[in-house]
Image (cartoon, grey):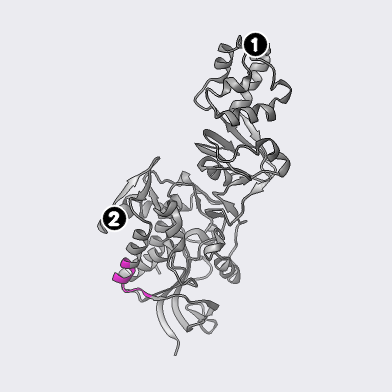
Amino acid sequence: MPLKKDVVVIGAGAAGMMCAIEAGKRGRSVLLLDHASKLAEKIRISGGGRCNFTNRHTGPDNFLSHNPNFCRSALARFTPQDFVALVEKHHIPYHEKKLGQLFCDGSSQQIIDLLRHECDAAGVAWQMPCRVNNVSRVNGASAGFMLETDRGTLTSDTLVIATGGLSIPQIGASAYGYRIAEQFNITITPLRPALVPLIFAPEQLDGFSTLPGIAVDAAVSCNGARFRDGLLITHRGLSGPAILQISSYWQPGTPIHIDLLPDLDVTSWLFDQKHSSALLSNLLTQHLPRRLAEAWVKATIPEQAEVPVNRYGNKALKQIAAQLHDWQVIPDGTAGYKKAEVTLGGVDTRELSSKTMEAKKVPGLYFVGEVVDVTGHLGGFNFQWAWASGYAAGQFV
């Protein structure tokens, strides 16, 4: 006889474990399974190994989706304060790094241990590693599922897909959740890497070959979004928090706009220097790293790179100021899923109930976490979506 459970959750990451915990608390018999042999690798490597487990300032505006209001219901019912209470219950020391970002003082393993302990306390059963070879309706009925796995056959009343996205395939990410959605004729919105470094074409890199490792505070904007944070020049292009944030909004072929001196009125400053006999690149070292200042001037105004500032006219100074506040760069692409923190797009939220996370046309089938078309900004928001969506589904599965 197949093993029978009330709830089977495929995917033992942040959202999957949260859903299993909540379902178990309601007295449901829950089986949590995952194809990986090591639990929650994405949590383990997050936040530099300290897990940026939530953000105090989480709100709907911190998320991208084709249906931007979808996330409101789940986020309202399980807040950052709710997860902080869980962290404090387990006596895990934590700190706020900046902008509401909360990290463990110690290790991200503490969050994994918290979730594992809560699952065990809720009576959740485990199968890891376990590969699901086929999912179908029980005898073609409108309710109940049959799963054929490499550990045998399972049946359940409800099935939760919490398999994550395509980001970081080296730790086991796969398209499995999207395949299940497609099997049941559920729409998938376009997928692409997000929170990911941007890369330059080889010819773009020529003038910046000496700059990898240079970091500056900048304001970066694209397609109506703007982020003020660190920008890092790499051997392939641009990274750092501001670039990772804007990558979710960038579209191929379009420029990103970089304000290299967001706190300075560059026009006024340059006019104060207009009688200087120094080169512009030398003056810019008052505000920018020398190598960046020299490379920027050569790339942006090569014909004036060796001209003293006192030979620039007012019009030229205004143009230079405008370019420093709006350095336009057209990336050649992204660094791909291997370097992306999350996947943009996913299971179309118009196919799901915002209250329960259940598929509207497939009773008993639920989707939670990154597999859904809800993608957070950098800074703990994607974990908060995992907790909130898992919690929401856990009340109904």
Q: Which mark is residue 310?
A: 1
Identify the residue at horizontal 68%, vertical 17% (top origin).
316
User: Residue pushed farthest top?
Assistant: 275
Residue under the point 52% across and 34% down: 216
134 above or below 354? Answer: below
Left or right: 203, with 140 as reference point = right
Q: Who is closer to the viewer here, 41 or 85?
A: 41
Q: CA distance from mark 1 to mark 2?
A: 60 Å
Where is residue 287 drawn, in percent x and y?
Answer: 52, 25
Q: How crowded is the residue under tag 1: few (<14 C-alpha within 10 Å), some, or many (20+)?
A: some
Quadrant position of the C terminus in the picture: bottom left
Spot occupied by residue 352 in the image (x, y as percentages of width and height): 50, 61
The residue lying toward the viewer, choosing from 251 and 299, is 299
Residue found at the very far bottom of the displayed protein: 1
Q: Looking at the picture, does residue 326 appear above or below residue 113?
A: above
Q: Secondary structure at mark 1?
A: helix
Tell me the kind of residue under disc 2. Ile
Q: Secondary structure at mark 2?
A: loop
**Disc 2 residue crowd, few under 14, some 14–19, many 20+, Cα 10 Å:** some
Is residue 317 magenta-colored? no
Residue sitting at x 69%, y 22%: 305
Q: Which stretch appears magenta?
A: 117-125
* Residue 92 image label: 2
Query: Residue 124's spot in the image, x, y percent?
Result: 35, 73
Q: What's under tag 1, amino acid-wise?
A: Asn
Say left or right for 312 vs 139: right
Vertical arrangement, residue 66 with respect to residue 242, above or below: below
Q: Nearer the viewer, mark 1 or mark 2?
A: 1
Task: Say which label, 1 or 2, has the lower sequence index.
Answer: 2
Residue 26 visible to an observer of this rendering: no
From the top left corner, tell me how far across and down residue 340 is, in percent.
56, 53
